[in-house]
């Protein structure tokens, strides 16, 4: 019987593929036998049996199965393992970690296994959890840590959906705001290994000094193959580029030279107009005839007021906008009265934090009097007696505008127990746990992520090198507060920008050190602060217990509205806007007011022009909630005397 006539044509293709695989296998074994006879019949028969049921047959798989034996399978597995080890040696770090997905998609499992690699300052992650099965030249995500401003954080608290509690968060700061990579490690050792590697690149980096490392010869990564683009595709790309240029030109003509967003056109007046229109429509729909005519009268009066206001304030603005829109088509004409060689534009602000300056050099301290002044004149201020002497309640000083002094603890009403949740009782705080050493007040073109980047932290014997008895409790605590210097907008919430920056340097008080040495008999506030120092770096929930509060002296005589006076002395929890960083010589708590709610930012900005009339007491504390954590005690603070923000200079201009 002729077999060829009783089988399908696909059978002959599979048989031919199997015979070709046998030829290759026999050649490798130095066997000179041909493909005919018994050697080709056995696999052909097996192929026919496998093809009898489902019809979904793959000739390549059949050829591989026919030409491979058990020894070849072991060899293949061993080769993949060796390949994985070779790939791991090409990177400084290479591990399989879980990464939290981003975006707005609602997915059941947001944590997926990815392979992370670190070579020099380049951090990458891939789709597959094993590097041996991923293409090193095509990562799913890549970032050069030397060219970005980053901050690494290690968390040991469980997160919803995370496989383990060993988490690492890499915060990336850019012009578009803040983004983050959240990674989950398998154990504590892996977490510490990656955290130490990423932490070395924390801080603000310069693009000029950042160079991506080149792998040595034995660690070269194969670059992806560059495909040649056909001429037709090049023509399409050129057409698309022209279309994009025309679109950008149209946007610049319509909305300004910088191509602003449509949202910028809708200012607060336009938004308020939309709100009034909607409210009016609702009133007309459900109201009576009298309400209708009253609403029409109010709308007409408001329209007249708006038109009078806009005519007096927008004439110059329209001229500027017209000049901006025409800048693409004609050059500006020279003016005869002004010399073209003169540069009348104000000098640009200096780049932020390029110099490291001495702390306390941006704003003066109030002048001490009496015995304290004689002590400072003879021994200098950098002595334990002078530093802690200024914190004494009976210390005499001269109140001068635009200066600062130590704050009194009894200025702030804080929680007391027992059963505060029911009684809501508060009483004046005791002496601060930390005394004020110095204050810096300046402006910058961006927020300051680390005080050490712009100031030289002092090393004072007997002050900053005190042994607290616990390695996590610092001798110096630095609080860095970044406030917006420009008017906030309702529809924009940037995390960075031009700022007034106030830095408060606190040193531990002798009484606090004594209580830490006798910890069993320490006050609840000292025990709570010690716990906060231990967990603030890893536990965001406990870190958010820090509270900031402001108390104005003689607030009734300042003529402030009631909604402002009602918040006098009210504490504010520093939650997402706070970042805790531990340094070898100190600990730093950064507060980014740019991340506050719009109403809070708007209210603070509106009060800035009245700061020269204020004597502002600023204090910080750790929130106590249970009876064993009460009463609260002020952690530290400063007393700002008639602060004039117009006198503040840019960092480095002092």
Image (spheres, rainbow, N blue to C red):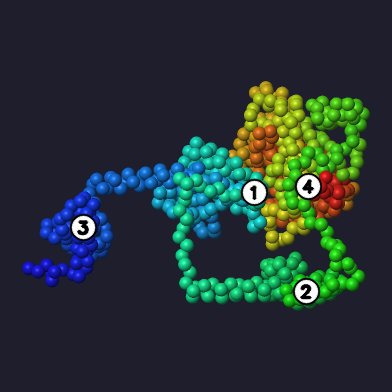
Q: Position of residue 296 (x, y in %)?
A: 78, 76
Quadrant of image for the N terminus: bottom left
Which is closer to the viewer, label 4 or label 3?
A: 3
* Closer to the eye: label 2 or 4: 2
Indicate left or right for 456 with 537 as reference: right
Residue 331's label in the rendered image is: 2
Mark 3, residues whose alpha carbon is within 10 Å: few (<14), some, or many (≥20)? some
Q: Are marks 4 and 3 in contact (CB under 8 Å)?
A: no
Q: Crowdedness of circle 2 by 10 Å Cα count: few (<14), some, many (20+)? A: few
Alpha-carbon neighbours of circle 4 within 10 Å: few (<14), some, or many (≥20)? many
- Tell me, yes or no, if residue 275 can be seen here: no
107 over 92 or under it: above or below: below
Q: Going from the N terminus, do you reach mark 3 or mark 1 first? A: 3
Helix, strand or loop for disc 4: loop
Where does label 3 land, which residue? 23
Packing grade of label 1 (10 A; few <14, some 14-19, many >=20) is few
Label 2 or label 4, whichever comes before in sequence order: 2
Query: Which x, y percent locates residue 21?
Result: 23, 58
> According to the image, label 1 marks what residue?
209
CA gap, disc 2 to disc 1?
A: 37 Å
Q: What residue appears at the point 25 percent right and 62 percent down from the top-left corner?
A: 59
Q: Which residue is mark 4?
A: 651
Foreground: 138 or 642? 138
Instruction: Tell me what residue is drawn at x 50 percent, y 46 percent.
Output: 216
Q: Is residue 190 left or right of residue 385?
A: left
Real-space CA distance between mark 2 and mark 3, rounded to the nearest whole angstrom: 78 Å
Q: Residue at x 92, y 29 (%)?
A: 370
**653 up-or-down from 427: above or below:** below
Label 2 residue SS: loop
Q: Secondary structure at mark 1?
A: loop
What's the distance in space between the residues labelled 4 and 3, CA to CA? Answer: 78 Å
| Quadrant containing the C terminus in the rendered view | top right
């Amino acid at each position: 019987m002729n077999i060829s006539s009783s089988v399908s044509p696909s059978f002959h293709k599979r048989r031919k593929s199997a015979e070709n695989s046998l030829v290759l296998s026999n050649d490798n074994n130095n066997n000179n036998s041909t493909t005919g006879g018994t050697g080709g019949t056995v696999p052909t028969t097996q192929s026919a049996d496998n093809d009898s049921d489902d019809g979904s047959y793959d000739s390549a798989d059949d050829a591989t199965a026919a030409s491979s034996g058990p020894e070849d399978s072991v060899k293949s597995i061993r080769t993949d393992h060796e390949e994985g080890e070779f790939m791991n040696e090409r990177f400084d770090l290479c591990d399989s970690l879980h990464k939290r997905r981003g975006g707005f998609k609602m997915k059941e499992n947001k944590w997926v296994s990815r392979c992370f690699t670190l070579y020099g300052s380049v951090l990458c992650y891939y789709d597959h959890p094993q590097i041996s099965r991923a293409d090193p030249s095509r990562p799913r995500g890549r970032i050069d840590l030397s060219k970005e401003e980053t901050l690494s954080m290690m968390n040991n608290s469980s997160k919803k959906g995370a496989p383990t509690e060993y988490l690492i968060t890499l915060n990336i700061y850019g012009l578009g705001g803040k983004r983050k990579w959240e990674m989950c490690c398998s154990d504590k050792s892996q977490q510490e290994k990656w955290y130490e590697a990423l932490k070395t690149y924390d801080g603000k980096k310069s693009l000029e000094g950042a160079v991506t490392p080149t792998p040595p010869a034995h660690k070269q990564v194969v670059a992806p193959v560059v495909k040649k683009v056909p001429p037709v595709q090049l023509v399409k790309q050129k057409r698309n580029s022209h279309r994009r240029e025309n679109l950008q030109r149209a946007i610049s003509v319509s909305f300004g030279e910088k191509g602003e967003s449509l949202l910028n056109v809708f200012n607060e007046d336009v938004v308020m107009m939309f709100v009034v229109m909607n409210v009016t429509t609702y009133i007309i729909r459900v109201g009576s005839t009298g309400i209708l005519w009253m609403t029409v009268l109010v709308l007409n009066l408001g329209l007249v007021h708006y038109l009078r206001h806009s005519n007096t304030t927008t004439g110059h603005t329209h001229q500027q906008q017209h000049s901006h829109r025409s800048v693409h088509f004609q050059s500006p004409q020279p003016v005869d009265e002004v010399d073209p060689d003169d540069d009348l534009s104000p000098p640009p602000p200096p780049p932020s934090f390029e110099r490291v300056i001495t702390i306390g050099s941006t704003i003066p301290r109030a002048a001490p009097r009496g015995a304290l002044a004689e002590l400072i004149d003879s021994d200098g201020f950098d002595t334990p007696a002078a530093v802690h002497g200024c914190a004494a309640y009976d210390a005499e000083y001269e109140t001068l505008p635009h200066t600062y002094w130590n704050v009194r603890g009894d200025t702030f009403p804080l929680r007391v127990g027992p059963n505060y949740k029911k009684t809501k009782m508060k009483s004046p705080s005791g002496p601060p746990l930390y005394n004020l050493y110095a204050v810096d007040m300046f402006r910058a073109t961006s927020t300051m992520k680390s005080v050490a980047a712009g100031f030289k932290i002092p090393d004072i014997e007997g002050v900053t090198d005190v042994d607290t008895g616990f390695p996590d409790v610092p001798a110096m605590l630095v609080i860095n507060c970044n406030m917006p210097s420009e008017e906030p907008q309702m529809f924009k919430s940037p995390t960075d920008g031009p700022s007034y920056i106030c830095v408060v340097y606190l040193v531990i008080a002798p009484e606090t050190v004594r209580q830490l040495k006798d910890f069993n008999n320490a006050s609840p506030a000292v025990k709570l602060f010690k716990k906060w120092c231990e967990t603030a770096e890893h536990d965001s929930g406990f870190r958010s217990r820090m509270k900031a509060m402001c108390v104005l002296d003689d607030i009734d005589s300042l003529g402030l509205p009631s909604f402002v006076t009602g918040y006098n002395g009210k504490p504010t929890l520093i939650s997402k806007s706070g970042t805790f960083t531990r340094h070898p010589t100190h600990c730093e708590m950064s507060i980014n007011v740019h991340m506050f709610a719009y109403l809070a930012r708007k209210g603070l900005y509106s009060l800035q022009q009245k700061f020269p009339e204020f004597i502002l007491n600023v204090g910080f504390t750790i929130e106590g909630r249970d009876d064993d954590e009460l009463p609260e005690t002020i952690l530290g603070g400063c007393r700002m005397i008639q602060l004039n923000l117009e006198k503040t200079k840019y960092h480095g201009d002092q």
